Amino acid sequence: MAFIALCEGYLGIEPHLEPWRYFFSVSLHKKRERSGDLSMPVGCTGIHLWGHRSSKYMTYPLLRSNKGWHALWFYVKNTATAPLSNFIRRLIEEAPPVWGWGPPPEKEKKRLRDLLDAIVYLKSQGLHGADVIRAYHVRRVVPLMACALPMYGMMPDAQLDGMVLA
């Protein structure tokens, strides 16, 4: 969500895949079968900054391990007024081939150079991941919800109807 808010709120663009691929990678984690464990495989994904690119991205502390995740677990009540999606038992057991694409090729990086330079500039001016997250909380939006306006359209005189953080 911070990447979406960075694009919309600070770069003034719609988020798109190429700069995201430049900075991030996706990996699949699988539960190992042991006696007494769940009988079905449980897979989840991890999103990580490419190590050598983290110096160009805004400071944003990401987890390096999910160890102890259960201590931070919480439950959400399923209500009729805001129902949760049904669990469809669809599991990701193998990583899709696109996850292995990695950063864009050199030709695409040249096209992205101005955008990447803008991100490096914002970081050099002290932009931190917490600032980006604070910006979308102040505007009471969540970057992944259906928004009436992108963050860069939220000017002081803009109509913010439908932009309510529930």
Image (cartoon, rainbow, N blue to C red):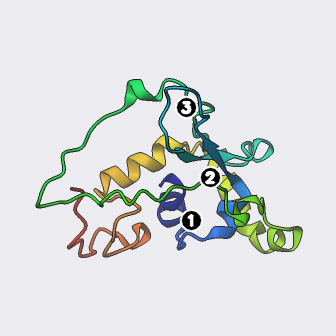
Q: Which residue is mark 3?
A: 66
Q: Which of the 4 quarters of the picture holds residue 105? A: bottom right
Would residue 2 be found to the left or right of residue 81 on screen? right
Quadrant for the C terminus, please. Answer: bottom left
Looking at numbered disc 2 in the image, what kind of residue is underneath it? Leu
- Who is closer to the viewer here, 127 or 89? 89
Tell me where residue 115 appears, x and y as whole percent: 69, 66
Q: Which of the 4 quarters of the picture holds residue 104? A: bottom right
Decide: marks 1, 3 in contact (CB < 8 A)? no
- Marked residue nearer the N-terminal end (1 or 2): 1
User: Separation of disc 1 and disc 3 at Cα?
Assistant: 31 Å
Please name the residue shown 69% across and 52% down the image.
Answer: 25
Decide: marks 1, 2 in contact (CB < 8 A)? yes
Judged from the image, the secondary structure of the residue bearing numbered disc 3 is loop
Q: Which residue is mark 1?
A: 11
- Who is closer to the viewer here, 51 or 64? 64
Please name the residue shown 54% across and 64% down the image.
Answer: 7
Tell me where residue 125 appears, x and y as whole percent: 62, 46
User: Separation of disc 3 and disc 2 at Cα?
Assistant: 29 Å
- Who is closer to the viewer here, 56 or 74? 74
Q: What count of labels does the image hold?
A: 3
Marks 1, 3: nearer the viewer: 3
